[in-house]
Structure formats: C-alpha cells, structure tokens
Amino acid sequence: MKSIEGIWTLLQASACDAQGTPLAPPYGNRPMGTIMFEGGRMLAVLCNGDEDLGSASRREYSSYGGTYTFDGRTLETLVDIASDTSRIGGRQVRDVVLDGKRMTLRPPTRAYGGAAQQRELVWEYVAPIPPRPEV
C-alpha cells in the first residue's frame, strides 16, 4: 500500500449524471483545491477558480477534514470540521486510484442540486508536509 501522506493539488474535477452523460465541471474550468494528509488527519478545500462565473449564481466551494483511514483502495474520513455542517459526524468515503504522482478520488454517486451525479477528482502530489518547529 502506498502512502498518501503529504500535500496534493487539484488538477481536474469532472461529473456525469446517473446515465453516464458528462455534466459541466463541478468546480468550473479552472478548479482549485488542496488536500493534505498527515498523521491520520486530512483537510481538503476545493473551489471554482474561474475568473468569470458567467451565468452561474454562485461559486462552488467545499472544505472538510477529520481523521482518515486508507487501505490502498478506499479513503474513509470521519468528518469533524466542514463548510457544510451537515457533514460533521459523518463519513466521507472515496474510491482511490494511485498512478505515480496522481491520485483519483471518486465519491459515491449522490444528489447535487437535486440531481444524481458521479464526481471524479484528480489530484497531483506536490510535497511532503514540512516538519513543524519545536515549541
């Protein structure tokens, strides 16, 4: 099992409907995001990084964190902080595919804005977590 500890940056976010038809990218054409894993805790933040949102009424944003386990194929996080407070106390489960310095996370299909979507997030490894100074 490969470790996922370190800092990752979001490269791509895509979505499709229940029939597999591609949908508009959930975080726009220029998704921004960082995910960090260290010592059994993780923190993720994602947003739409497009300069102009066009007719979109709001900029997509999500963040959450908590303790995690990773068995080489599945990432499971027990959420204890989140921008959407309904996630706190819940579990976020993601299928994981590691390919070199790339990691693809695929959450279960769920409703976004009333319609079922399957999302896929592609991350690239950036760096290890820097050591913390002694206090």
Image (cartoon, grey):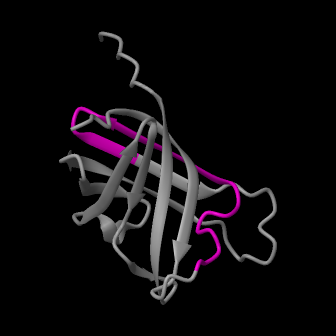
Q: Is residue 79 above or below residue 107?
A: above
Residue at x 40%, y 19% (from the top left corner)? 130
Q: Position of residue 86 (x, y in %)?
A: 33, 72
Which region is colored magenta?
22-43
37 in magenta: yes
Q: Quarter-wise, where is residue 76 in the image?
A: bottom left
**Relative to residue 8, is residue 104 depicted above or below?**
below
Is residue 100 shown above or below 132? below
Residue extending furthest toward the front: 99
Q: Residue at x 59, y 77 (%)?
A: 22
Image coordinates of residue 1 in percent, x first then y, are 21, 38
Residue found at x 58% / y 55% = 12
Name the one closer to the observer, 116 or 133.
Answer: 116
- How far across and how far down the image is residue 113, in percent? 52, 84
x, y percent for residue 135: 30, 11
Task: Using residue 38 as the reference point, say whether residue 1 is left or right of it.
Answer: left
